Image (spheres, grey):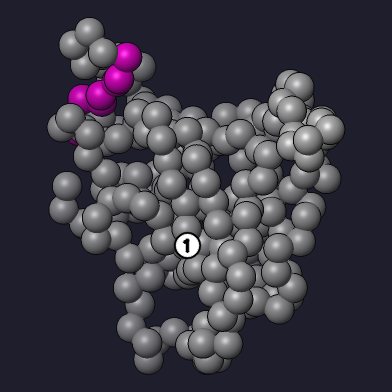
Amino acid sequence: MASVAQPPAPLGGDPFGGAFDAAFPGETKEEDMPHGLIEEFKAQAGHRIDVLGDMAASLNIKFNDRAARKPIGNLLNERVEEGAAIRSIGWHAIRVHEYEEVPDGEREHVGMRNYKDEDGARILLEKAKYLVVAPDRPPGFKGRIYVRNDGVWRVRDVMTIVLDTERYARLQTEWFGGVDAHHVMLDEVECRNGIVSYWFGS
């Protein structure tokens, strides 16, 4: 689908409850960007930060027409009718994998539990006023730039700006003729050099 400026999809449920102070499109011209943003990005060269950790997260995309989702032949994949209007984009309830240490130094998966507020409280960055969020799709989408005036980004804040980005990016995806509502399982979220990257699977 062509990249066309349009209002974002309505916000659905966000169990993370993170926050940001401002946001603007990634295609904003350099001269129109906030003072100090470019300099900060140049100074943020650093290591990769795993945002998702042991959490399991998936998008909850709802449509005005509940019959908009259609099977693709005999496959387990789903498609959405062309032109179907999104009612909201949020997160499903977040789950967290639990592990136990085993003698060989590996971790053994023992189950899953519900998300707790402390899972989202982990501090990722403490002196980064700006973050760019760059999704893996759609092609040509320039991402979005987010601001926290205190420079402190926690897991909950980054997951909230990922969700906010999807409210714009998802409208421009295409999967068998309609919006991609099939690839919603979050595989990975990382932060490196001021850029938040993430990837969805099915």
Residue 39, position as x, y percentages in the image: 53, 91
The magenta span reads 76-83
Q: Which residue carries the number 1 mark?
A: 133
Say above or below: 33 vs 85. below
Side of 29 where 133 appears, left or right: right
- Front-most of 199 and 47? 47
Say above or below: 84 vs 119. above
Residue 65, position as x, y percentages in the image: 32, 20
Say above or below: 111 vs 141. above
Q: Please say whether residue 99 is one of the residues in the magenta stretch.
A: no
Residue drawn where x is 61% and y is 34% of the image:
56
Magenta-drawn stretch, dominant element (helix, strand or loop): loop
Residue drawn where x is 17% and y is 47% of the image:
1
- Front-most of 12 and 188? 188
- Tell me the quarter of the image containing the C terminus: top left
Tell me if residue 41 can be seen: yes
